[in-house]
Image: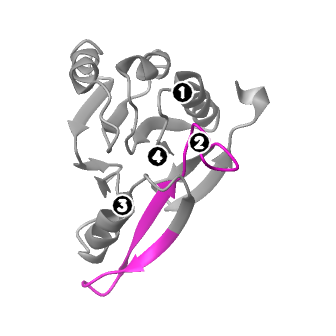
Amino acid sequence: MKICIVSDSHDRGPMLAAAASRSIAEGASAVIHCGDIIGGNTLKATIDLGLPIHVIHGNNLGDPVLIARIACDSDGLLQYYGRDASLKLADRRIYLTHYPHIGHGMACSGEYDLVCCGHSHVPEIRQQPNIKGSSTFVVNPGTVAGLGAPKATWVLADLESMRFEIRELTPADL
């Protein structure tokens, strides 16, 4: 199963939808958003693409009530978890947090195969040794909005092979 991992869209709905659309073209069947959506309307164009979207809110809360309403009206496409989330996709245990330091700690626990975070606007993919004697992938997709960063980025993940690729949005994507 391939998924699109994004974060820090900061009300840039067209950029979020562009990353999701590119991921669909590459076989993705779900989107994970690691927070800082801001407004619920940011998600509407992405929901219209028909992929399940798993969302947490981050530190820029925006309008969580509207996001919850949109989730209720999405026929199950939008799953809004709040502050953080623990979910299972393709038999992989995944933890979502907005904050890299919390992501690091959760990766060290060995309870997850993949920990996704955001906040820093800096993309990073690494393996973190954990207390169970193995390692956990930590993925920060950077910012899909490109704010405070040289590029707008997202990650295409293959959960079967546990391969992760940082992708950049280009003007042609929008």
How far separated are the C-alphas under marks 2 and 1?
A: 10 Å
How far separated are the C-alphas under marks 3 and 1?
A: 24 Å
- Secondary structure at badge 3 equals strand
Residue reaching furthest to the top: 73
Q: Residues within 10 Å of mark 3 (few under 14, many from 20)?
A: many
On the image, numbered disc 3 is attached to which residue?
Answer: 115
| Direction from residue 165 to residue 36 in the image, left or right | left
Which sits earlier in the primary sequence, circle 3 or circle 4?
4
Which mark is nearer the camera, 3 or 4?
3
Q: Amino acid at mark 3?
A: Val
On the image, numbered disc 1 is attached to which residue?
Answer: 12
| Range drawn in magenta | 126-152
Query: Residue 154 in the image: x percent, y percent?
Result: 57, 45
Query: Which residue occupies the foreground of this view, 82 or 114?
Result: 82
Residue at 69% across / 38% down in the picture?
169
How far separated are the C-alphas under marks 4 and 2?
A: 29 Å
The image quarter containing residue 37 is top left
Residue at 49% across / 35% down in the picture?
9
| Direction from residue 155 to residue 74 in the image, left or right | left
Q: Residues within 10 Å of mark 4 (few under 14, many from 20)?
A: some
Q: Amino acid at mark 2?
A: Leu
On the image, numbered disc 2 is attached to which residue?
Answer: 147
Label 2 with label 1: CB-CB less than 8 Å: yes
Magenta highlight on residue 141: yes
Label at residue 1: 4
